[in-house]
Image (spheres, coloured by chain):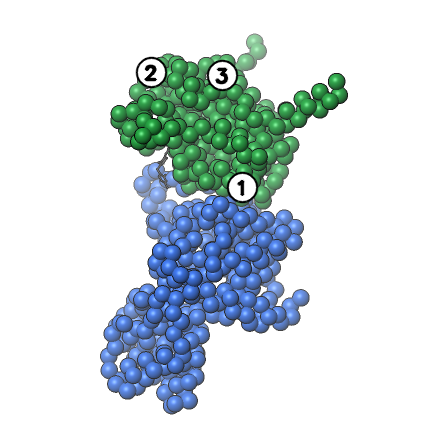
Chain colours: A blue, B green
Amino acid sequence: MNDKQLMAGNHVIGEAAIRAGCRFYAGYPITPQNELCEYMSEHIREVKGGVFIQSESEIAAVNMVAGAAASGARAMTSSSSPGISLKQEGISSMAASEIPALVVNIMRGGPGLGNIRPTQGDYFQATRGGGHGDYRTIVLAPTTCQEMADLTMDAFDLADRYRNPVVLLADGMMGQMMEPVVFKEPKPRNYSEAYMMRGAGSGKSQIIRGLILDQLELEEHNWKLARKYNIIRQNETRCELFQIDDAQVGIVAYGTAARVAKGAIKRMKGAGMNVGLFRPITLWPFPERELRKLSEKIKYFLVFEMNLGQMIDDVRLALQGFAEIGFFGRPGGVVPTPVELANIIDQRYFKKNGPISRG
Amino acid sequence: MKKIFSRPKSLKDAPFHYCPGCGHSIAHRLICEVIDELDIRGIAIGVPPAGCAVLAYNYLDIDMIESPHGRGPAMATGIKRMLPDRVVFSYQGDGDLAAIGIAESFHAANRGENITVIFINNAVYGMTGGQLAPTTTMGQRTTTSPLGRTRELEGYPVQVCELLSGLRGTTYIERCAVNTPANIMKTRRAIKKAFEYQMDNKGFTLVEILSPCPTNWKMSSVEACKWISDVMTKEFPLGVMKDIPSAQEKKAVAAHD
Ligand SMILES: Cc1ncc(C[n+]2csc(CCOP(=O)(O)OP(=O)(O)O)c2C)c(N)n1
Ligand code: SF4
Ligand SMILES: [Mg+2]
């Protein structure tokens, strides 16, 4: 059962979700995440009580998930960028009502309909809440199929622990790529029956509401959520440090960009250039303290993203001026090569060793 | 002395916030009476809308989860699929169901979800101040159709029952009204039948209720009830639009005769 298997990223997420006890999936087709939708249609129904619905829209899907999750099920939906925009209504209301769920975004080129190539254009949307109101979602960014498996399972645990939607943020490249994975044993579910809406029985009836008309009451609800978000900030940051110990330059990258960065780093090491990688695994909460600590030794960071520069804002906030920050990125679905990235770092730092600005 | 009228057990002892003469209060009471009669308070789960009935959970003493505007049938779908032995219903206004939520309603109906929709048609957006609704009648003035609804500008009213009856996924659809005592009793029977069909796993059921909104119609309660008979029922004829189980029963009886 737990042998190594060769699987595509989209299938890995589906399999990991089912193993983690996900029993409700609703989604609407959109490239490049269709394989996940299709995998769920075939396999979630193989387990007892498992439900798959191809919904009429992403809006319907996310609200179906809210209903299923409120009634106590582990539930998820998935989509790609344009569909995730439509899901924001439901994500905001699940955050407001403290309903746990997993939302997978296999990002594609934008804005608008864009294209179906891999990008990281939805960083802001994912990490700033995305919908209306003061709220946050936990955002997990895998780089390998193995990590997709592990983080999908963790996502359900985190959603339960904090009663909050969790976003798994990957891109079209990762959805399609095949790598060996081993599925870990999921942890037993730890979620109070008291939060489940399953009919009042002979007891007191419960309500889950979104509307809180009294401003002081709504303020208190917002503060309550804020306290929760602060606990998440304290306890849940995750990151990977790769060959960073003696690095002169630190690349900051996640997801597919981090894979490219690792390729560039190996290549540069061979040429005597010491470059390391700081890879946030949680994009929200952003691992600020861990990055700031690195600035005690590293004085130049290059933020590398497949967009026009979004995570760079979090890097600036984390480093607070303690190190120089440069940016390299390409939007529109272009995945830069390790050689391209290595050349940029060589030119900007090792050849000139001067300050670098965005773009 | 025999007590013949009292507050249903599943209706909380709280004063309604609805305007005097509003149909929502009557519909709430009828739902609660049926819940009591069928003894399903413990297994009923309601999904109130964005609309004047957004606070329905302050009155119905059952588990309730509020839906974003128009998404009630999607939420009810998620709940019912996970808890097939509960009685799950959405409660929706005309804007909620027939405008912003038409896709969710249409497709829940078409999938034949085993849920019930209680549809309050008051021909306006009550909560936001009486704007044009998909069910605003021809010529009716609202705050956003100040000269009256026209074919050219706003098109015709949406007839939800007729529309959804055409879908093979639907089981039972009836249009009622709460403007006269006789109509109120019919509405109660319709809600009961819908819940019973759901409990027998018969599939998608919907009860439309023509419901007075004296405030936004700028009428007295009495005038509003009369306007339902005189105007609304012309656009929205009352009656059973579809009742598959009862038609099948009749057929079976006829085959025996
Ligand atoms: C996404 C969204 N758009 C708009 C609104 C504002 N809004 C609240 S209720 C409503 C219309 C209510 O009309 P109806 O569904 O007919 O219910 P009624 O109040 O008449 O019972 C609107 C437009 C909202 N809550 N959410
Ligand atoms: S505005 Fe109309 S629908 Fe809303 S509570 Fe008043 S009468 Fe009822
Ligand atoms: Mg209305």
Label 1 belongs to which residue?
B77
Label 2 belongs to which residue?
B220
Figure check: A281 above or below A204: below
Quadrant in the rendering for residue A286: bottom left
Question: Under tag 2, what secondary structure?
Answer: loop
Chain to which the residue tagged by mark 1 belongs: B
Q: Which numbered marker is on residue B183?
A: 3
Tags 2 and 3 on a common chain: yes
Q: Which amino acid type corresponds to the residue marked 2 in the rendered image?
A: Ser
Chain to which the residue tagged by mark 2 belongs: B
Residue A4 is situated, as x and y percent measured from the top left of the image, at 62, 71
Q: Residue furthest front?
A: B152
Residue B251 is situated, as x and y percent measured from the top left of the image, at 68, 23
Q: Nearer the viewer, mark 2 or mark 3?
A: 3
Kindly report the distance in space between the C-alpha atoms of the residues bearing marks 2 and 1: 38 Å
Q: Which amino acid type corresponds to the residue marked 3 in the rendered image?
A: Asn
* Residue A94 seen anywhere in this rendered image of the structure: no
Q: Quadrant of ligand 1?
A: top left
Q: Residue furthest right?
A: B256
Figure check: A135 above or below B229: below
Q: Residue furthest top?
A: B1
Q: Earlier in the sequence, mark 3 or mark 1?
A: 1
Q: Residues within 10 Å of mark 2 (few under 14, many from 20)?
A: some
Residue A136 is situated, as x and y percent measured from the top left of the image, at 39, 55
Q: Is residue A266 left or right of residue B36?
A: left
> Which residue is at a point 59% across and 53% down the rendered structure image?
A41
